[in-house]
Image (cartoon, helix red, strand yellow):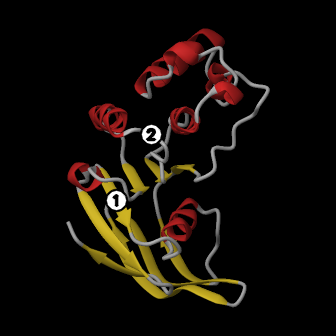
């Protein structure tokens, strides 16, 4: 479980989280919804430990995070974006990387550089790179931006078949149907309501 206990967090003088106590499940696919600026990204960053609350405690498993920005290296190939962050022997790293690229339907672009990829393809590369890290929970901030609906559905099916534990923010149609848990956010300060 992810547990917030009396958490307070501000950006400069803006209160984002105030006296926040809440528990989120860590099983299956959990979806965070809400309008832009309501605090979804901040909650993910707090869970990941990338931001520290001014007070209160957060308990969470080991995480890997996919940011809204793709953060790709222009001089590295698609395949290298994955193998470079692995600690496996080269042959094993390449095998795993190709498997992850197939999961996001980029296996035919392994030798390409990011500049020739579309925005949706760059997003899928960033998503595959996130899963090179062995973690208990994957935090995915708008993981399907620019990804067409049919491809998104196929990728989601593969992610769920692999039994990854996912906490993601998103607004695309169809995500709610695939989610095991849904929480709607409003604010700031953040208010969370369970809707599924």
Residue 53, quarter of picture: bottom right
Q: Quadrant of the C terminus?
A: bottom left
Image spot of residue 67 (x, y percent): 59, 52
Residue 161 lies left or right of residue 152; in this view the side is: left
For label 1, the crowd category at 10 Å Cα-Cα, with few meaning under 14, some 14 to 19 and many 20 or more, is many
Image spot of residue 20 (x, y percent): 45, 85
Answer whether residue 1 is visible to the viewer in this image. no
Image spot of residue 122 (x, y percent): 59, 35
Residue 36 lies left or right of residue 49; in this view the side is: left
Q: Are marks 2 and 1 in contact (CB under 8 Å)?
A: no
Q: Quadrant of the N terminus?
A: bottom left
Image spot of residue 59 (x, y percent): 47, 67
Nearer-N-terminus badge (2/1): 1
Answer whether residue 113 is visible to the viewer in this image. yes
Q: Nearer the viewer, mark 2 or mark 1?
A: 2
Residue on which the image places disc 1: 31
Q: Secondary structure at mark 2?
A: loop
Residue 183, quarter of picture: bottom left
Which label was assigned to residue 147?
2
Residue 154 lies left or right of residue 100; in this view the side is: left
């Amino acid at each position: 479980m992810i547990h917030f206990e009396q958490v307070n967090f501000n950006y400069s003088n803006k209160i984002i989280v105030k006296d926040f106590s809440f528990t989120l499940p860590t099983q299956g696919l959990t979806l965070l919804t809400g309008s832009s600026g309501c605090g979804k990204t901040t909650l993910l960053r707090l869970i990941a430990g990338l931001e520290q609350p001014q007070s209160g405690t957060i308990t969470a498993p080991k995480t890997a995070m996919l940011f809204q920005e793709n953060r790709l290296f222009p001089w590295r190939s698609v395949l290298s974006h994955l193998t470079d962050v692995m600690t496996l022997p080269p042959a094993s790293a390449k095998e795993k990387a190709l498997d992850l690229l197939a999961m996001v339907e980029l296996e035919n672009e392994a030798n390409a550089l990011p500049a020739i990829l579309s925005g949706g393809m760059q997003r899928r590369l960033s998503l595959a790179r996130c899963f090179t890290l062995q973690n208990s929970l994957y935090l995915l901030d708008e993981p399907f931006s620019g990804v067409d609906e049919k491809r998104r559905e196929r990728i989601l099916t593969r992610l769920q078949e692999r039994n990854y534990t996912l906490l993601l923010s998103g607004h695309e149609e169809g995500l709610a149907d695939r989610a095991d848990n849904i929480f709607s956010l409003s604010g700031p300060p953040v208010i969370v309501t369970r809707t599924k």
